[in-house]
Image (cartoon, coloured by chain):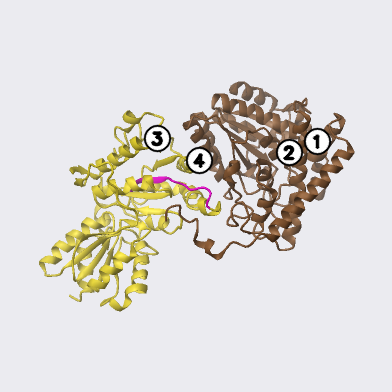
């Protein structure tokens, strides 16, 4: 199963123009070479509506974060997910609640998709006691044991080795849980990525590595940072199954993840998924974005994941304009409620400073 | 009690804890089929099988991170570094993941993991394979650092480290693996972390020593006793948490203190102990705190130069005589 996928991807990932041709093309041009374009809808209406709702919630939540950051309510680094919603929401929607997720510092949307309440996420960003990490982690370190969200990790690539260990543990414990690990394409240049993929395939660990290729590691473009720019094909170096997915298409993301989950759950096999996506905002809130043009951003916004999915849902008669307006209104309330909760949540008690350093001091 | 080497005492601790708790596993380079580069893990693969005793590729950052991840979801990994020199590649996972996970997750994810292996000076292996790294790890809140100086301590402390719910850096001295001593065979024998032990009682000066410097300090104390100088040798055993009260108590009794360590002096553990003594027992001191440390140079290869770089009995004796104004 794994090797078949790899072979299929290898063929489809080698266009006549070479790797650079693939990467310079917008994701829409890649669709027919990779995941089937506009995959047939397999999901029931309830699932589709839930996915749409989550994508919209993540978008509006992040827009509110930008506003709150500008007002000084959120401190430190704040990395927004706008433009990439299809990747996190699509992939996580394919998981069971007891599956694990580990990710990077651009994780607000994934945390919400895994089941942390927007209230607990926003309160964490506000540095409040009601935050999901009690205000000690902040934007980059969201955790919730109850929903198996094992963190935002902020040293690029670090979470890849951790996720490999979580997958090792589930195999050791003989459960059929899978572990999903998100990271950006810049993390692919770190040793942790290569060391982890090698161990995962060597020991057959049920880990799904999702590279969110948003084309920039902070302000450095892929072309300036990676000698061989086809991330999915790097899996070949470790004989890992891999897929190349249009990360602007939430259903393609979900279905690719489901295939990887099957490999992981049934055969303890890892998979590398490269999701081509794009971040609309700066690397963090302090990024002026001088390294790319407005026109480039607008080009990708034409393939906006929420717009694409909205069209799909309308074309297939799943949602009407009124349904969409109702969901928008509901999401607005949820975000307002999150902000209100964060505003009203108390600051951590000063006694918290010395708590949680050791489990057994 | 049985007389055994430090190597076998550590092996016994590993064996007992692997047998006691199925969530404990041992992972590292050459720990299984090769029986351990220093034979500390001899026979464990045979006893516990390849699921529990796992050979890794040479990929320190990778398997250190894998261990931390496994610890997040309920396992109790023992990660062996063939030597602590190689842990330097894994420091991101040890420091940024293991040490900080509990805190930055608001108390949700404890990391019960042991990183162990030989450290400190070794025989003629030059700069990259012969160095003391405890001050690095002791610097970080969230980590515990243990350095045994006898086979019995090695067994009791390693068992406690494996049962501990926090990440523990357990540094075995490479030159001490063959050292013999009496070791309790009782499976329930443990030594709590964070408790110093007076290895020799005395009244005239305190020598604070850890790891391989403990036998050196004991020899110095023996020699000084012949000159009528009574030295107390105290071994903190755990660097973090440090049993500073026991050290201060000894200093208040003897009023003179020498700190013997084989690490570099700059920003070292000895510097920290010295600062603590000055803060807590300044009025009791009859002489400035004196340190005996490894030379502040990368370790040389040549035998004569290496000998000059590692503190010896004579240097400790000279330091004690200095604080005693003799």
Mark number, residue A309: 1
Q: Which residue is disc 3 drawn over?
A: B22
Q: Residues within 10 Å of mark 3 (few under 14, many from 20)?
A: few
Q: Nearer the viewer, mark 4 or mark 1?
A: 4
Q: Residues within 10 Å of mark 4 (few under 14, many from 20)?
A: many
**C-alpha span from label 2 to label 4:** 28 Å
Which of the two residues, A150 or B213, is positioned nearer the viewer here?
A: A150
Give the chain letter for brown. A
Give the SS element for disc 1: helix
Give the chain letter for yellow. B
Question: Of marks 4 and 3, which one's residue comes earlier in the chain?
Answer: 3
Which of the two residues, A14 or A204, is positioned nearer the viewer here?
A: A204
**C-alpha span from label 4 to label 3:** 14 Å
Q: Are marks 2 and 3 in contact (CB under 8 Å)?
A: no
Q: Position of residue A96 (x, y in %)?
A: 63, 33
Quarter of the rendering occupied by the N terminus of chain A: top right
Mark number, residue B73: 4
The chain carrying label 2 is A
Magenta stretch bounds:
B107-118
Question: Of marks 2 and 1, which one's residue comes earlier in the chain?
Answer: 2
A315 is within the stretch colored magenta: no
Q: Which residue is disc 2 drawn over?
A: A86
Q: Nearer the viewer, mark 2 or mark 4?
A: 4
**C-alpha span from label 2 to label 1:** 9 Å
Q: Are marks 4 and 1 in contact (CB under 8 Å)?
A: no
Give the SS element for disc 4: loop
């Amino acid at each position: 199963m794994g090797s078949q996928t790899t072979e299929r991807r290898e063929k489809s990932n080698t266009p006549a123009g070479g790797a650079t041709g693939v990467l310079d093309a917008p994701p829409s041009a890649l669709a027919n070479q990779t995941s089937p374009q506009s995959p047939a809808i397999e999901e029931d209406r309830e699932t589709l509506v839930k996915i749409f709702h989550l994508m919209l919630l993540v978008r509006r939540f992040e827009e509110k974060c930008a506003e709150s950051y500008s007002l000084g309510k959120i401190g430190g680094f704040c990395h927004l997910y706008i433009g990439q919603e299809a990747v996190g929401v699509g992939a996580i929607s394919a998981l069971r609640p007891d599956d694990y997720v580990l990710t990077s510092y651009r994780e607000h949307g994934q945390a919400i998709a895994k089941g942390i309440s927007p209230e607990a996420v926003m309160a964490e960003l506000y540095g409040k006691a009601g935050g999901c990490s009690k205000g000690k982690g902040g934007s980059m370190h969201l955790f919730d044991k109850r929903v198996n969200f094992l963190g935002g990790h902020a040293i690029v690539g670090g979470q890849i080795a951790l996720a490999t260990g979580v997958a090792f543990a589930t195999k050791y414990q003989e459960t059929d849980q899978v572990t999903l690990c998100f990271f950006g394409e810049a993390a692919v240049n770190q040793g942790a990525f290569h060391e982890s993929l090698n161990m995962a395939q060597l020991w057959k660990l049920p880990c799904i590595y999702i590279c969110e290729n948003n084309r920039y590691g902070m302000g450095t473009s892929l072309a300036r940072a990676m000698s061989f720019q086809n991330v999915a094909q790097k899996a070949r170096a470790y004989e890992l199954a891999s897929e190349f997915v249009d990360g602007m298409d939430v259903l393609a993301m979900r279905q690719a993840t489901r295939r990887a989950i099957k490999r992981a759950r049934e055969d303890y096999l890892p998979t590398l998924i490269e999701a081509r996506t794009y971040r609309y905002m700066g690397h963090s809130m302090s990024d002026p974005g001088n390294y790319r043009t407005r026109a480039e951003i607008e080009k990708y916004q034409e393939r906006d994941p929420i717009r694409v999915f909205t069209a799909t849902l309308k074309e297939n008669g799943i949602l009407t304009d009124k349904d969409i307006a109702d969901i928008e209104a509901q999401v607005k309330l949820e975000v307002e409620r999150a902000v209100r909760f964060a505003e009203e949540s108390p600051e951590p008690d000063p006694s918290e400073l010395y708590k949680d350093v050791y489990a057994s001091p | 009690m049985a007389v055994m080497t430090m190597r076998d005492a550590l092996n016994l601790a590993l064996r007992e804890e692997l047998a006691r708790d199925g969530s404990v596993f041992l992972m590292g380079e050459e720990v299984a089929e090769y029986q351990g580069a220093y034979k500390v893990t001899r026979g464990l693969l045979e006893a516990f099988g390849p699921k529990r005793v796992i050979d890794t590729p040479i990929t320190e950052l990778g398997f250190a991170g894998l261990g931390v991840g496994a610890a997040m979801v309920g396992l109790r990994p023992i990660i062996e570094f063939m030597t602590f020199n190689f842990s330097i590649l894994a420091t991101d996972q040890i420091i940024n993941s293991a040490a900080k996970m509990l805190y930055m997750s608001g108390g949700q994810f404890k990391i019960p993991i042991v990183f162990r292996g030989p450290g400190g000076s070794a025989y003629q292996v030059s700069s990259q394979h012969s160095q003391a790294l405890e001050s690095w790890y002791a610097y970080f809140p969230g980590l515990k650092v243990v350095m045994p100086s006898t086979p019995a301590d090695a067994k009791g402390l390693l068992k406690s480290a494996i049962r501990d719910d926090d990440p523990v850096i357990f540094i075995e001295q490479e030159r001490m693996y063959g050292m013999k001593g009496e070791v309790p065979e009782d499976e329930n024998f443990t030594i709590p972390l964070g408790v110093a032990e007076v290895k020799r009682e005395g009244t005239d000066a305190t020598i604070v020593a850890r790891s391989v410097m403990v036998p050196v300090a004991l020899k110095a104390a023996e020699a000084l006793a012949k000159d009528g100088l009574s030295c107390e040798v105290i071994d903190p055993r755990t660097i973090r948490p440090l049993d500073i009260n026991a050290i201060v108590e000894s200093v208040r009794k003897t009023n003179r203190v020498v700190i013997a360590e084989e690490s570099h002096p700059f920003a070292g553990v000895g510097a920290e102990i010295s600062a603590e003594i000055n803060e807590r027992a300044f009025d009791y001191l009859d002489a400035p705190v004196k340190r005996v440390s490894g030379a502040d140079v990368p370790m040389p290869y040549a035998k004569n130069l290496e000998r000059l770089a590692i503190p010896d009995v004579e240097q400790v004796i000279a330091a004690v005589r200095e604080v005693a104004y003799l």
